[in-house]
Image: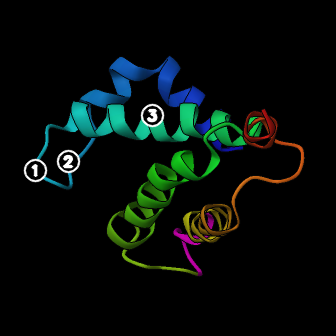
Amino acid sequence: MMIAIGYDKLQNYASKSAGFKPFFGLSGKTEFTMLVFAEFFCAAFIVLGLFTRLAAIPLVFAMGVALFVAHDAHFYGEGKNAGIYLVCFLTILLAGPGKFSLDRLISKS
């Protein structure tokens, strides 16, 4: 699901990055680029099980910003999905890759 959200932003990069509101003092385009990287590429790494914990860090950060900054910590309102994703990516960060991951195959070699 997160890959689809990131892919939509990647396809419409020019139009969506122009209106992106910066949160951390960087330009809106720079922050939007980091968001697309997290939502599309890092989510794809997690699906593959490649660099799982490392890929979860930007996603945890992005979902934390989405929930607490963009949605004002409305867990039961518009920030519900960001909260669910945040919990899921925190779990992946702490638990690591599963038995059928590329990380596991690489570490056996």
Query: Of tags 1 and 2, which is closer to the observer?
Result: 1
Residue at 74% in and 52% down? 97
Q: Secondary structure at mark 1?
A: loop
Residue at 10% in and 50% down? 25
Quadrant housing the C terminus: top right
Quadrant housing the N terminus: top right
Q: Secondary structure at mark 3?
A: helix
Q: Residues within 10 Å of mark 3 (few under 14, many from 20)?
A: many
Residue 22 higher or lower than 18, as above or below: below
Q: Is residue 103 magenta?
A: no
Residue at 14% in and 37% down? 27
Task: State whether the magenta stretch is mostly helix, strand or loop.
Answer: loop
Q: CA distance from mark 1 to mark 2?
A: 6 Å
Quarter of the image for residue 100 reads: top right
Q: CA distance from mark 3 to mark 2?
A: 14 Å
Residue at 67% in and 61% down? 92
Name the amino acid, label 1: Gly
Q: State which region is magenta.
A: 76-81
Name the amino acid, label 2: Pro
Residue 76 higher or lower than 10, as above or below: below
- Left or right for 48, reference 77: right
Q: Are marks 3 and 2 in contact (CB under 8 Å)?
A: no
Q: Secondary structure at mark 2?
A: loop
Name the amino acid, label 3: Val
- Left or right for 82, reference 97: left
Q: Is residue 77 magenta?
A: yes
x and y percentages locating residue 93 in the rendered image: 60, 62
x and y percentages locating residue 13 in the rendered image: 40, 21
Judging by the rendered image, the residue that carries numbered circle 1 is 25
x and y percentages locating residue 52 in the rendered image: 64, 47
- Picture disc at residue 36: 3
Judging by the rendered image, the residue that carries numbered circle 2 is 22
